[in-house]
Image (cartoon, rainbow, N blue to C red):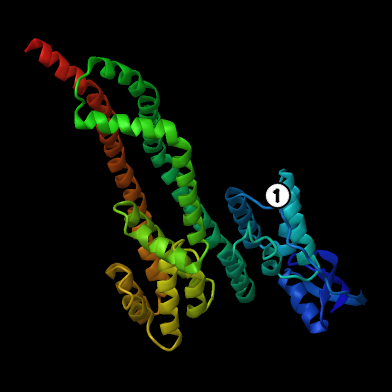
Amino acid sequence: MQNYDYTGRDNSGKLVKGTISASDEIDLANRVSRLGYFLVQATIRTAAAPSKVATPAARLSRREVLNFTIQLATLIEAGVPLLSALRELAQDIKNKNSQRIINDLVSRVESGSSLKEALLLYPNTFPKIYSSIVEAGESTGKLALVLDDLAKLLEWQLDLKARIKEASVYPIILFCAMIGVVTILVVKVIPMFKPMFSELGVKLPLPTRIIMTASDIFRGYWWLLLLFTIILAGLWKLLSLTSRGRYLIDKFKLKIPIAGDLLYKVGLSSFCHTFAMALRSGVNVITSLGIASEVVGNEYLETVIIKARGLVNVGEKIAVALENSADFPPLVIRMISVGEQTGSLSETLDKVNQFYDKEVPATIKRMFAIFEPVMIVLMGVVVGGIALSVFLPLIQLIGAIGG
């Protein structure tokens, strides 16, 4: 690799200068062209030493990545060369962390790296799917289009996360309130009645004996219960670190009533959104399936898609390959089949996306609409049951005195 001092012109004819690494003059011209410039002149500077680049530790939030993507897409679509667009973003952004990352992207792209290569250095900010789609956009000349699609995908993911968070607040508050009330009853209230029952000498009913025993165990061995909970959580974490463990856990998640249905639909929606976007950006079907499998957020569904990808790779149709798994709904299979037959697969997938964009929020609303009354009833049953078990001996005593 050689370092070249180059002179070029952008689309408006403005003269630009810079330094870039390239293997030869042809590679140099290609790299300068990718930056959005026309090469006018270049001279060899010095031999470039092999670089040892450490992965930067800085990262952007999901919202910051969305804003970066929208602004970069807008500038490139307006005809601004990539390097100039990145420089403008670096100047406009006030956040020091964001500015530091974008300045690093500028320096790497300026030195000859593709945008995809620069993004790969920030895997915690720009996941593999992001850099893969950007690479497709760079190679096909559709960078503005793919960035716009990426922005829509990121916006959809953020909106979905916000909907789930908003809908889950009330059930979580109810659950925490129930745990708090039960803890106070078991630790503080029930022990106050135990001496009184002993003095009265009444035979305690079975529910009361169970509650008293549970109170004694909790108060005397709470540390053991806490240790047991920590061990279970640790075993669950260890299981989730293995591929087979994640597969089994994620398969179990899909079978959970109500919540499993939501996870299933979110996974399918993510698959269809990403598959359509990858195809539209010019990525081939096999690679697109691989990219789409990474965003479903479920190891079991990812395995299903990877198996289907293997069948497609040996000549099977996509619809047939996915249908063999029996994990994809008929709607998705039919629409993919129609898309394959008509040669408009990304367009038919977009229609599936339109369905899931309505169905997923509706499922979230239904799920938490069910959870709220269930939590209220559960709280009433648990607290009421504890209270009743405490007052049963008193009721029996009053009945005996009255008789």
The picture places residue 234, in percent across and down from the top left corner, at: 51, 53
Question: Is 90 on the left or on the right of 291, as rendered?
Answer: right
Q: Residues within 10 Å of mark 1 (few under 14, many from 20)?
A: many
Picture residue at 63% right of the left edge, 76% below the top: 139
Identify whether 252 is placed above or below 100: below
Q: Along the horizontal axis of the image, is 116 left or right of 358? A: right
Any part of residue 298 in sight: yes
Image quadrant assignment for residue 6: bottom right
Give above or below for 46 relative to 190. Answer: below
Residue 163 horizontal/vertical position (percent): 42, 45
Whether residue 81 is visible, yes or no, is no
- Three-letter code for the amino acid on which mark 1 is drawn: Ser
Above or below 401: residue 327: below
Against 342, is 366 above or below?
Answer: above
Name the residue beneath numbered marker 1: 98
Q: Residue at x 81, y 64 (%)?
A: 14
